[in-house]
Image (cartoon, rainbow, N blue to C red):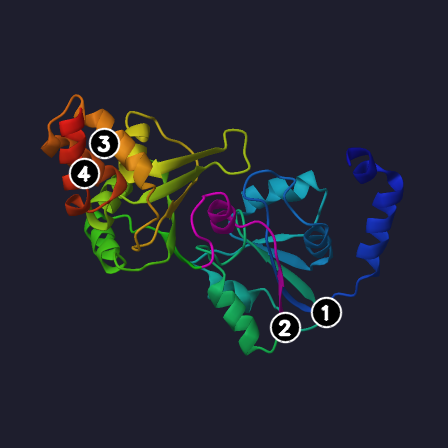
């Protein structure tokens, strides 16, 4: 596969295909890598090369990407505070190709760009998505949680009061939930999720596609314990199960309950089991009594 991919014949074939494609004027929404610089499509690179200019959230970060691929297209800073101004002063016309990128991943997904896209639509410009990397989609695909229905919430509110109010409002949503969070607030957010959503199954994706990529899966209690004492760094994507009861392997629960009962009272044992598996205390109490008698 490596030899085929690097063969000069294949590279010539790809180059010919890219150069033969006709690209209409308009604004192209171009996805860029979320970490690994190789995670970008040939088509995206061609658009970035052909564009009159590239609107970028952070031109310094974007320049690293362009330099790696030897693309000389001018960059124009476009962030949430200057989107309208950029659209007007950049002399956007319906005769040229323009590109919009974010710091990483698919533009507009918890990133600026909404206003400039709508401004272009209002002026009759065509909008073309160039799909590619997305942290939310990459995260849920590797989470082990249901993917048939999910809700993306973006960044969790930074202030404690707003965050708790937000979590209360989504407590009964039964779809898998996806959040972004910064490293210095991860513990606070996980603790609030535990308090307000219950001890749900969770997958935390850190530094996806990068050297220190990490996926940690387990209950919220398990993950809070795992990350306690860590000096956390990197980008975090949090995937949490919905409000519906997850399928519980009863044999697994009873086996663990039996072990816990050997060194704990029935009351303390049930508390541990209910917190970890989010099961009904009533359903397992009689079974705990039976196991305790047998032990």
Which residue in the protein does label 1 denote?
24
Which residue in the protein does label 2 denote?
126
Residue at the spot 74% in from the left edge and 65% down from the top edge? 23
Place residue 292 in its image quadrant.
top left
Locate residue 229, reporting x and y percent: 29, 25
Locate residue 141, reporting x and y percent: 51, 47
Place residue 18 in its image quadrant.
bottom right
Q: For the residue carrying disc 2, how many other residues have a C-alpha within 10 Å: few (<14), some (14-19), or many (20+)?
A: some
What secondary structure is found at the residue carrying circle 1? loop
Which residue in the protein does label 3 denote?
257
What secondary structure is found at the residue carrying circle 3? helix
Place residue 288 in its image quadrant.
top left
Task: For marks 2 and 3, give the one nearer the viewer.
Answer: 3
First along the sequence among labels 3 and 1: 1
Task: For marks 3 and 1, give the one nearer the viewer.
Answer: 3
Query: Seen in the image, is 29 located left or right of residue 147?
Result: right
Which quadrant is the N terminus positioned in?
top right
55 over 262 or under it: above or below: below
First along the sequence among labels 2 and 1: 1
Q: Residue 280 bears which disc, if any?
A: none
- Count the labels in the image: 4
Residue at the spot 65% in from the left edge and 62% down from the top edge? 98
Question: How far is disc 2 from disc 4 in space, using C-alphas?
Answer: 64 Å
Question: How far is disc 2 from disc 1 in space, using C-alphas?
Answer: 8 Å
First along the sequence among labels 2 and 3: 2
The answer to whether the residues at label 3 and label 1 have Cβ atoms under 8 Å apart is no
Task: For marks 4 and 3, give the one nearer the viewer.
Answer: 4
Q: Residue 287 bears which disc, if any?
A: 4
64 over 94 or under it: above or below: above
Locate residue 7, reporting x and y percent: 85, 38
The answer to whether the residues at label 4 and label 3 have Cβ atoms under 8 Å apart is yes
First along the sequence among labels 1 and 4: 1
């Amino acid at each position: 596969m490596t030899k085929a991919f690097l063969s000069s014949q294949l590279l010539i074939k790809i180059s010919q295909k890219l150069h033969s494609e006709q690209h209409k004027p308009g604004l192209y929404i171009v996805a860029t890598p979320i970490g690994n610089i190789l995670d970008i499509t040939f088509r995206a690179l061609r658009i970035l090369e052909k564009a009159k200019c590239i609107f970028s959230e952070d031109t310094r970060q974007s320049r690293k990407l362009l330099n790696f691929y030897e693309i000389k297209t001018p960059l124009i800073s476009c962030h949430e505070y200057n989107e309208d101004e950029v659209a007007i002063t950049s002399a956007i016309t319906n005769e040229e190709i323009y590109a919009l990128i974010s710091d990483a991943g698919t533009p507009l997904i918890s990133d600026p760009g909404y206003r400039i896209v709508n401004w272009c639509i209002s002026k009759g410009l065509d909008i073309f998505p160039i799909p590619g990397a997305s942290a939310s989609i990459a995260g849920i695909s590797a989470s082990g949680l249901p993917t048939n229905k999910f809700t993306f919430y973006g960044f969790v509110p930074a202030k404690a009061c707003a965050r708790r109010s937000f979590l209360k409002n989504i407590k009964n949503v039964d779809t898998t939930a996806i959040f972004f969070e910064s490293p210095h607030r991860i513990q606070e957010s996980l603790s609030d999720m535990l308090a307000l959503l219950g001890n749900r199954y969770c997958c935390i994706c850190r530094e996806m596609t990068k050297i220190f990529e990490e996926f940690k899966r387990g209950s919220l209690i398990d993950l809070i314990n795992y990350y306690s004492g860590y000096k956390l760094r990197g980008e975090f994507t949090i995937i949490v199960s919905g409000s519906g009861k997850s399928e519980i392997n009863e044999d697994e629960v009873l086996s663990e309950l039996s072990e816990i009962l050997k060194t704990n009272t029935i009351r303390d044992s049930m508390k541990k089991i209910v917190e970890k598996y989010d099961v009904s205390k009533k359903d397992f109490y009689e079974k705990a009594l039976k196991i305790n008698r047998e032990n």
